[in-house]
Amino acid sequence: MEELKPASQWKETIWPVLVSKANEFRLIGYKKASVEDVWQCMQKKIWKNNPQKRLYEVVQDIFHLSNNQYVSFITVEAYQNDDLMASIEAIRHGSSETE
């Protein structure tokens, strides 16, 4: 029987699959697609709560990741990061005005 592990523990083993998926996204026009973005998308959108998976299940999940799911993830991440940076800037400017 194949080994079950939390999805997050398969990263090293499935690295070539992640590279392949990132290359696929770049070929269809997402020029900034990275292996780490694909991995983060899988962890946050597909494998919430880090489920136990077999190797073939993890590979299958990655190959079935659609460009819509990926773009949705990247968009949400960008908005969250922008909001964080805007908040940091607001705090910086707010505190310097009181000095």
Image: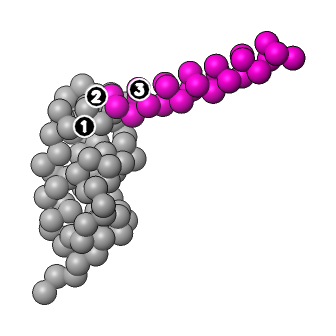
Classed neighbour count for the residue bearing mark 1: other residues with Cα under 10 Å, few (<14), some (14–19), many (≥20): some
Q: Which residue is mark 3?
A: 79
| Image point (19%, 72%), residue name | 54
Of the numbered discs 2 and 1, the one sitting upstream in the chain is 2
Query: Rounded to the nearest whole Å, what is the CA distance between mark 1 and mark 3?
Result: 14 Å
Compared across the picture, whether 91 is left or right of 3 comes to: right
Q: State if disc 3 and disc 2 touch (CB < 8 Å).
A: no
Of the numbered discs 1 and 3, the one sitting upstream in the chain is 1
| Image point (26%, 31%), residue name | 71
- The mark closer to the camera, 2 or 3, is 3
Q: Which residue is mark 2?
A: 30
- The mark closer to the camera, 2 or 1, is 1
Check residue 70 in the rendering and tell me which mark sits there, or answer none: 1
Total marks drawn? 3
Q: Position of residue 94 (x, y in %)?
A: 72, 17
Q: Position of residue 74 (x, y in %)?
A: 33, 33
Which SS type dominates the magenta stretch?
A: helix
- Viewer-proximal residue, 97 or 52? 97
Q: Secondary structure at mark 1?
A: helix
Asked if the magenta segment contains residue 27, the reply would be no
- Residue range in magenta is 75-99
Amino acid at pointer 2:
Tyr
Query: Rounded to the nearest whole Å, what is the CA distance between mark 2 and mark 3?
Result: 17 Å
Amino acid at pointer 3:
Tyr
Q: Position of residue 76 (x, y in %)?
A: 34, 31
Q: Position of residue 5 (x, y in %)?
A: 28, 75
Quadrant of residue 57 within the rendered picture: bottom left
